[in-house]
């Protein structure tokens, strides 16, 4: 499995790019999973649903499945700081690519999403794990770089760059143990 992170500040376009990369990679015959960093209190379940009622009753884990889908919800009694590597370990083994959105502080190789209009600093000058920059303004990068600069508005080209450089993103869980 290959794992790449997409890091950038809120509003930079991470979700939009990842959303477009999924079908671009699928068109190349690749199976794609996503790990997404969320804020403290998020919910994918809804009041009144059986799974919500089970969680509200105190279940530690609820797994719901059909012939087309599986979802696992786990409630932590105390705040738990899971690393991105813990989350990757939860994924199905038969995936080709894992796109990690968020986790900008992680030690994963990542593509930085940077837009000058967002008014946030670039991370690549100080983050050795940034291996490429995807931007809509390459002429406005705040610091020179030898890293590839990708067109944020051309997700097919970004997908092709990932595929062409796939060996760099081979994931070895032992490396992060």
Image: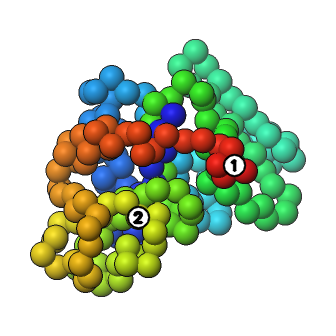
Residue matched to label 1: 86
Placement of 120 over or under 127, stated as above or below = below
Q: Position of residue 93 (x, y in %)?
A: 60, 27
User: How far apart are the two marked residues, 2 and 1, measured between alpha carbons?
Assistant: 21 Å
At 81% from the left and 55% from the top, the residue drawn is 76
Q: Position of residue 110 (x, y in %)?
A: 43, 58
Residue matched to label 2: 130
Residue 144 in which image quadrant:
bottom left
Scheme of image coloration: rainbow
Q: Residue furthest top?
A: 67
Residue 33 visible to the viewer: no
At 68% from the left and 29% from the top, the residue drawn is 64
Q: Residue furthest left?
A: 139
Q: Callout 1: helix, strand or loop?
A: helix
Q: Position of residue 124 (x, y in %)?
A: 37, 73
Residues 98 and 14: in front is: 98
Give the label, 2 or 1, closer to the camera.
2
Would residue 107 be found to the left or right of residue 113 on screen?
right
At 33% from the left and 29% from the top, the residue drawn is 26
Q: Position of residue 160 (x, y in %)?
A: 24, 40
Lower sequence index among marks 2 and 1: 1
Residue 37 in which image quadrant:
bottom right
Residues 145 and 66: in front is: 145
């Amino acid at each position: 499995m290959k794992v790449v992170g997409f890091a950038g500040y809120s509003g930079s376009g991470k979700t939009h790019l990842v959303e477009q990369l999924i079908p671009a990679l699928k068109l190349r015959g690749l199976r794609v999973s996503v790990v997404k960093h969320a804020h403290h209190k998020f919910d994918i379940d809804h009041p009144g649903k059986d799974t919500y009622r089970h969680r509200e009753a105190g279940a530690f884990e609820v797994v719901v499945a059909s012939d087309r889908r599986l979802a696992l919800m786990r409630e932590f009694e105390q705040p738990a700081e899971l690393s991105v590597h813990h989350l990757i370990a939860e994924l199905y083994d038969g995936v080709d690519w894992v796109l990690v959105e968020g986790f900008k502080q992680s030690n994963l190789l990542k593509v930085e999403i940077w837009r000058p209009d967002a008014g946030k600093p670039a991370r690549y000058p100080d983050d050795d794990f940034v291996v490429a920059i995807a931007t809509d303004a390459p002429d406005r990068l705040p610091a020179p770089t030898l890293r590839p600069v990708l067109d944020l508005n051309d997700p097919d080209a970004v997908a092709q760059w990932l595929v062409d450089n796939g060996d760099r993103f081979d994931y070895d869980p032992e490396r992060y143990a």
